[in-house]
């Protein structure tokens, strides 16, 4: 479904993404893990048209989308749920969901989808008229995911969905991600919680300093000594490439 080849993104003289190549198959969950500043979020921003790559190609379902504007990429079916949720705090829960469907013209189906999500996320349904800014962090993350799903994505980009959440809420968010995947949505997941991400991933990529340094199935990476030491509770962090 998605092929990235030699992607580079620079902020001034700083090369945030340096020759990244990865692929996502239809129906897969692919996890992109790594430390803060590794270039994971910038990779997603390039995929969704929020930043312009300086080199490389992004091909989605056989079509080159490298130079498309963000709204055109949304129109192709790629939806980005950003780090920090980016909900519109002074609008209601229901209004946030409506905005997720801004490109859709099937208004009856949009209303049906809103009703469905308010039922699937009862905490949102009970407060549908409340301002989104009044929600807890975990509730805001549910809203951000539901808003993304309102666009009926073919590929869902999730950036750090568990960031800053209590363990119970992290478990709930990952359960939601599994449900979304089971219903047929392909997912590219950026996540610092490597254990949880690799547990649900078909394939994983590890980024360091803007580059992919390791790849494998979720199970293979979970068993890798480099990953265990760096992300799954080992004693020494270090750079992964020194352990490979």
Image (spheres, rainbow, N blue to C red):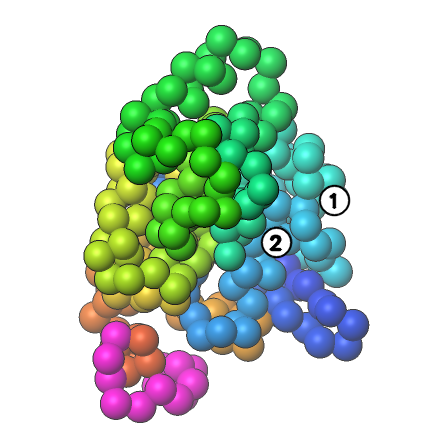
Q: Which quarter shows the C terminus?
A: bottom left
Q: Main SS type for the magenta part?
A: loop
Give the magenta range.
232-244
Q: Position of residue 83 (x, y in %)?
A: 51, 56
Picture quadrant of residue 176: top left
Q: Front-most of 202 and 42? A: 42
Q: Position of residue 49 (x, y in %)?
A: 67, 46
Residue shown at 54% from the left, 74% from the top? 37
Q: Front-most of 135 and 37? A: 135
| Residue holding disc 1 | 67
The answer to whether 150 is drawn above or below residue 25 in the figure is above
The answer to whether 58 is drawn above or below residue 152 in the figure is below
Give the structural element (helix, strand or loop) at label 1: loop
The answer to whether 14 is drawn above or below residue 86 in the figure is below
Q: Position of residue 238 (x, y in %)?
A: 39, 89
Q: Front-most of 20 and 192? A: 192
Residue shown at 38% from the left, 20% from the top? 115
Give the structural element (helix, strand or loop) at label 2: helix
**241 falls in the magenta region:** yes
Residue shown at 28% from the left, 82% from the top? 229
Q: Position of residue 31 (x, y in %)?
A: 38, 56
| Residue holding disc 2 | 45
**124 falls in the magenta region:** no
């Amino acid at each position: 479904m998605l092929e990235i080849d030699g992607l580079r993104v620079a902020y001034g003289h700083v090369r945030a993404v340096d020759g990244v190549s990865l692929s996502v198959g239809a129906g897969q969950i692919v996890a992109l893990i790594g430390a803060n500043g590794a270039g994971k979020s910038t990779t997603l921003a390039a995929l969704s048209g929020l930043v312009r790559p300086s080199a490389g190609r992004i091909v989605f379902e056989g079509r080159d989308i490298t130079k498309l504007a963000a709204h055109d990429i949304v129109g192709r079916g790629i939806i980005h749920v950003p780090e920090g949720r980016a909900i519109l705090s002074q609008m209601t829960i229901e209004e946030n969901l409506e905005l997720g469907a801004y490109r859709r013209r099937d208004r009856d189906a949009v209303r049906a989808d809103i009703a469905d999500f308010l039922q699937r996320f009862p905490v949102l349904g009970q407060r549908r008229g409340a301002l989104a800014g009044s929600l807890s962090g975990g509730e805001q993350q549910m809203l951000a995911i539901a808003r993304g799903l309102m666009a009926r994505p073919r590929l869902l980009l999730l950036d750090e969905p568990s960031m800053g959440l209590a363990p119970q809420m992290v478990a709930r968010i990952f359960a939601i991600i599994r449900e979304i995947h089971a219903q047929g949505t392909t997912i590219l997941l950026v996540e610092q919680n490597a254990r949880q991400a690799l547990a649900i991933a078909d394939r994983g990529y590890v980024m360091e300093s803007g580059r992919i340094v390791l790849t494998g199935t979720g199970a293979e990476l979970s068993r890798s000594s480099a990953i265990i030491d760096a992300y799954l509770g080992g004693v020494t962090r270090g750079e992964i490439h020194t352990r490979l």
